[in-house]
Amino acid sequence: MRGLLVIFSGPSGVGKDTLLEAWTARNPLVQRVVAYTTRAPRPGEQDGVDYHFVSRERFEELVAAGAFLEHKEVHGNGYATPLADLEAMLAEGLITVLKIDVQGALDAMKLRPEAISIFIAPPSFEELERRIRGRGTEDEATLLRRLENARLELSHQSAYAHVVVNDAIERAVDELEAIPATMSR
């Protein structure tokens, strides 16, 4: 049986990785497509696990070869969804999750209207800012750009079929787990 495609996005710092990690731990059918990026790895990130970290040149070669479902420039870096990996996971019957920025999600929803779209929202903008600052991974200019982008991204949540507020991990994962269960497989 073919799997389900889930488009999973929200602003930077909302806790997408944390929720996705908890969801995949709970349900072995939930698997994330590892995206490509031109940005440098953050401390603790591993190539091929968190992202496929590639040079700008290699990224452009893959774009030209048609290797991606979609690709975007976000926060000054390239990000893309590998088409072959996505299709292989769907063929295995998995709940195939694209953890993707809002720009890419909007494109992916047009390209794959059958996808289940889920927007992860913060309990408040103030809490989102606290989380981003708490990471300590960006300088002030980058942080301010992320916050401005977050305001724009939050304005697009109505384009998604589902909005899950990340206020408590277990509660949010319960809600995530219930969404595909309502879809025909």
Image (tube, rainbow, N blue to C red):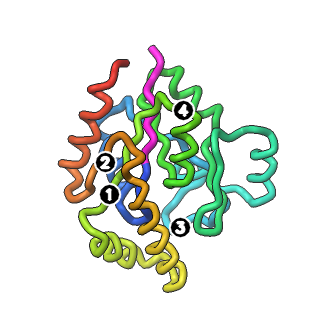
Identify the residue at image location x=45%, y=14%.
Answer: 1
Q: Residue at x 51, y 39 (%)?
A: 109
Indicate which label's residue lies in the foreground, 2 or 3.
2
Circle nearer the N terminus (2, 3) = 3
Identify the secondary structure beneath mark 2: strand
> Reading the chain from its start, which is encountered first: label 4 or label 1?
4
Residue 155: where, in percent of width, then height? 40, 60
The answer to which of marks 2 and 1 sits earlier in the sequence is 1
Contact, CB < 8 Å: mark 2 with mark 1? yes
Q: Name the residue rendered at 27%, 36% in the picture.
A: 177
Distance CA(mark 2)–CA(mark 1): 7 Å
Within 10 Å of disc 3 (Cα), the crowding (few <14, some 14-19, many 20+) is: few
Give, as a three-letter code, the residue at label 4. Arg
Q: Main secondary structure of the magenta part?
A: strand
Read off the residue under disc 4.
112
Magenta highlight range: 1-8
Counting other residues with Cα less than 10 Å from the Cα at mark 2, is it few (<14), some (14-19), or many (20 or more)?
Answer: some
Q: Is residue 166 magenta?
A: no
Task: Tell whether 118 sits left or right of 104.
Answer: left
